Amino acid sequence: MGFLFGVVIGIALGIALIVAFAKWQSIRAKRRSELAEVVAAFAGMTVQDSRKIFTPEAYPPWVVYSEWQKLNWLNLQLDKLWPYINEAASELIRTSVEPILEQYTPSILDSLKFSKLTLGTVAPQFTGVRILDGKPDEIIMELEMQWDGDPNVVLDIKTLVGVALPIQVKNIGFTGIFRLIFKPLVDEFPCFAAVSYSLRQKKQLDFTLKVIGRELSAVPGISDALDVSVEKVSLRLSYLLTND
């Protein structure tokens, strides 16, 4: 009797396991099918579909303008190269910007120059690229760049009364469109004789200033003077880049 009872229980458990496994396989197959449908839907997503998903403020240029293309591959390579670009670009920026800083030093200051300048660890991101129609012997490319970096920029300022203050530039955010023109095209590698560049549109430039060890507002007149000075330097650099 016990033997028969064991056989019946074993058969019942076996059937239950088979049914449960079959149901699990069915659920798994359904989920895989649903995932495949979602992936297929995203793969076939058009620009119009993207506009329905994103808010207008969040549109990348490749969604707003059909001629803009994404640059994921370039951003991946830029992340790898950024430590080396940081070293080279930091010194180039220092030598290029310091003469402009001297030119626009506020009257209440005796000197204004960099004591530290590195671009940090966060690389800019290129959010779109497009090729424009140009002359037969040139290629015109526009790149939109967005940078919310963590640079280490410290300005050493000295007032007319001899007081020295280290000013840190923080929370730099920049978005703009750069234009590259490769011309003239030639029949020798790299197939163009020169490259010119310019800033075609400055969409955003934000930053904050802070006196190291104290609040900038605690120093009368310095905050407003520096804000005006930095804004003038920014406009001057924008002009130089735009009219390169």
Image (tube, rainbow, N blue to C red):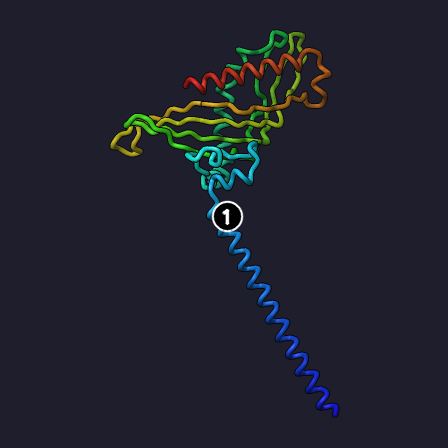
| Quadrant housing residue 231 | top right
The front one of 20 and 166 is 20
The reply to whether residue 84 is visible in this rendering is: no
What quarter of the picture does the C terminus occupy? top left
Q: Is residue 212 above or below residue 78?
A: above
Residue occupying image coordinates x 54% and y 12%: 102
Please state which amino acid type lies under the numbered disc 1. Answer: Phe
Q: Residues within 10 Å of mark 1 (few under 14, many from 20)?
A: few
The front one of 100 and 156 is 100
Relative horizontal placement of residue 17, taking residue 200 as reference (left or right): right
What quarter of the picture does the N terminus occupy? bottom right
The front one of 130 and 56 is 56
Residue occupying image coordinates x 42% and y 26%: 179
Q: Position of residue 130 (x, y in %)?
A: 41, 32
Relative horizontal placement of residue 196, taking residue 128 as reference (left or right): left
Mark 1 — residue?
Answer: 42
Is label 1 in a helix, a strand or a loop? helix
Q: Is residue 31 above or below residue 156?
A: below
Q: Residue furthest right?
A: 2
